[in-house]
Amino acid sequence: MSDFEAEFARRNALSHALAMSHCLQDHLPEMRATAETSLVRNLPSLRREDSEWIDRAQMRALLVAMDPMRPAITVAILNAVANVGDKRAIRQVEGLFGRIAQTDDPNEQLVRDAAYACLVSLREHAKRAKQSDLLLRGSNKPVAATKSILLRAAAKSGESPAAELLRADCAGRDDGASGKETNDDSSA
């Protein structure tokens, strides 16, 4: 199987499993069990770049289905949410963690540990997203007032000697020029 075929099969299986997320709250136990089995099997393959094709309703259905009494599906959901890094899930994961923070039940401890790891990952994703927004702020188009400030600063600085001005690097040119200006009209 080629890499393309494997990726296609992964995405197809994951897409079908995510479509079943609404069935996790179904009134038929068989439907819930089928959806749970499919999601537990396919959610571990969810990656950060897959976040674009998980709609809000599917994410909400997954988050609502988290229950410490259903540790297999809850841990699978928490790990998937941590991989995707959806910061909208932070509040619900915090709520789940808070409810079972002081538990002695082994199943709830498993869910608690997964919730804690998920919270750490979600907060890290949110922090990186915030930092990336801050770093990109400088690349915005300057406002008109900035141009006038630059012009005033240039006017006050006076003339600079030609030797101190910056020039383009001509080392990568193929025409054999070594930084000297050439006049195309003089060759005719």
Image: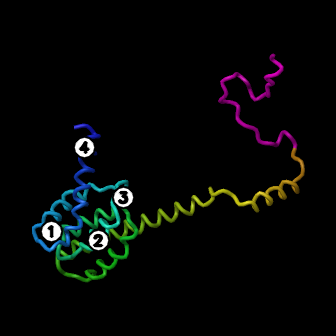
Residue 142 horizontal side relative to residue 131, left or right:
right
For the residues labelled 2 and 1, the Cα–Cα distance comes to 15 Å
Q: Mark 3: which secondary structure?
A: helix
Instruction: Reply above or below: 91 against 44.
Output: below
Q: What is the number of callouts on the image?
A: 4
Q: Residues within 10 Å of mark 3 (few under 14, many from 20)?
A: some
Mark 2 in CB contact with mark 1 (< 8 angstroms): no
Q: Is residue 52 magenta?
A: no
Residue 32, disc: 1
Q: Residues within 10 Å of mark 2 (few under 14, many from 20)?
A: some
Question: Which tag, 2 or 1, sits closer to the chain's start?
Answer: 1
The residue that appears at 17% across and 79% down in the rendered structure is: 105
Whole-percent x and y of residue 169?
70, 35
Residue 165 horizontal side relative to residue 34, left or right:
right
- Point out the stretch of residues depicted in magenta: 161-188
Question: Which tag, 3 or 1, sits closer to the chain's start?
Answer: 1
Where residue 140 sits, quadrant-wise, is bottom right
Three-letter code, disc 4:
Ala
Q: Which residue is mark 2?
A: 63
Where residue 134 sits, quadrant-wise, is bottom right
Q: Which residue is mark 3?
A: 51
For the residues labelled 3 and 1, the Cα–Cα distance comes to 24 Å
3 vs 1, front mark: 1
Q: Is residue 167 magenta?
A: yes
Whole-percent x and y of residue 183?
81, 24
Coloring scheme used: rainbow
Residue 6, disc: 4
* Front position in the image: 104 or 137: 137
Three-letter code, disc 2:
Leu
